[in-house]
């Protein structure tokens, strides 16, 4: 992801920051909290305990909604099939996050390659241990823009969710 968007990655507060701060992501062990990690040759290495379940958290740090495609072991987390950037996506609102607890049919667990979802479902092991996060901004929106349109804020402040006013 960071290479695709031309950014670098860094680990801060046990979350990985990528794409020049557009998103932060990390793994949470359901028993112990965020996993520790380190950078090695521009790759993020995270270490978990065998058989522990974990979730993937992705935070949108921008003021625009982002479309996010996530893969584990080379498989899309929504349908469990081989991942591509054109797969169905999570929509993560501005300043919100999404927690992904597993494929639709199983949870994420650390384990041996031979016991991985990818190997058991497809016999393929080349991407086992790889977590991918692809991020897409809406067309025409700059996710790095750090200011809010003041005119839009004024309009929204004066809007009402109801057509009629209540007494």
Image (cartoon, rainbow, N blue to C red):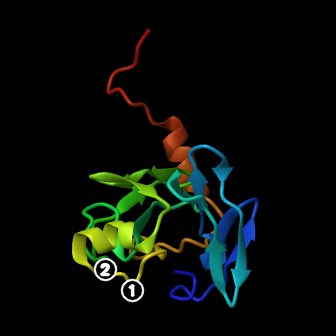
Is residue 102 something one can see in this rendering? yes
Instruction: Please identify, in this view, whether the residue under mark 1 or under mark 2 is nearer the observer.
Output: 1
Q: Circle 2 sits in a helix, a strand or a loop, which is it?
A: loop
Residue sitting at x 27%, y 69%:
120
Q: Position of residue 4 (x, y in %)?
A: 50, 87
Asked whether, in this view, residue 97 is left or right of residue 126, the answer is right
User: Separation of disc 1 and disc 2 at Cα?
Assistant: 15 Å
For this rendering, which residue is in front, 99 or 39? 39
Answer whether residue 149 is visible to the viewer in this image.
Answer: no
Relative to 5, residue 10 above or below: above
Label tally: 2
What's the mark number on residue 84?
A: 2
**Number of residues whose C-alpha sits closer than 10 Å to that of mark 1, classed few (under 14), some (14–19) or many (20 or more):** few
Residue count near mark 2 (Cα–Cα under 10 Å), binned few <14, some 14–19, many ≥20: some
Pick whichever, 12 or 104, lies toward us: 104
Relative to the observer, which residue lies in front, 150 or 29?
A: 29
> Is 160 rendered above or below residue 47?
above
Residue 126, image x, y percentages: 39, 86
Mark 1 highlights which residue? 126
The vertical placement of 79 against 96, above or below, is below
Q: What residue is at 58 percent from the left and 51 percent from the top?
A: 29
In-front residue for pair 116/84: 116
């Amino acid at each position: 992801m960071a290479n695709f968007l031309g950014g670098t990655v860094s680990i801060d507060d046990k979350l990985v920051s990528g794409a020049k701060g557009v998103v932060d992501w990390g793994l949470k062990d359901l028993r112990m909290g965020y996993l520790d990690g380190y950078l090695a040759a521009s790759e993020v290495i995270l270490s978990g305990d065998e058989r522990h379940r974990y979730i993937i958290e992705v935070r949108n740090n921008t003021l625009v909604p982002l479309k996010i495609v996530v893969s584990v072991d080379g498989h899309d987390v929504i349908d469990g099939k081989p991942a591509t950037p054109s797969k169905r996506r999570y929509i993560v609102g501005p300043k919100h996050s999404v927690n992904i607890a597993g494929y639709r049919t199983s949870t994420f667990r650390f384990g041996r390659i031979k016991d991985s979802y990818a190997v058991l479902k497809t016999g393929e092991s080349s991407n086992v241990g790889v977590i991918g996060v692809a991020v897409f901004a809406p067309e025409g929106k700059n996710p790095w823009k750090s200011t809010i349109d003041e005119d839009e804020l004024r309009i929204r402040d004066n809007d009402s969710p109801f057509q009629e006013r209540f007494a």
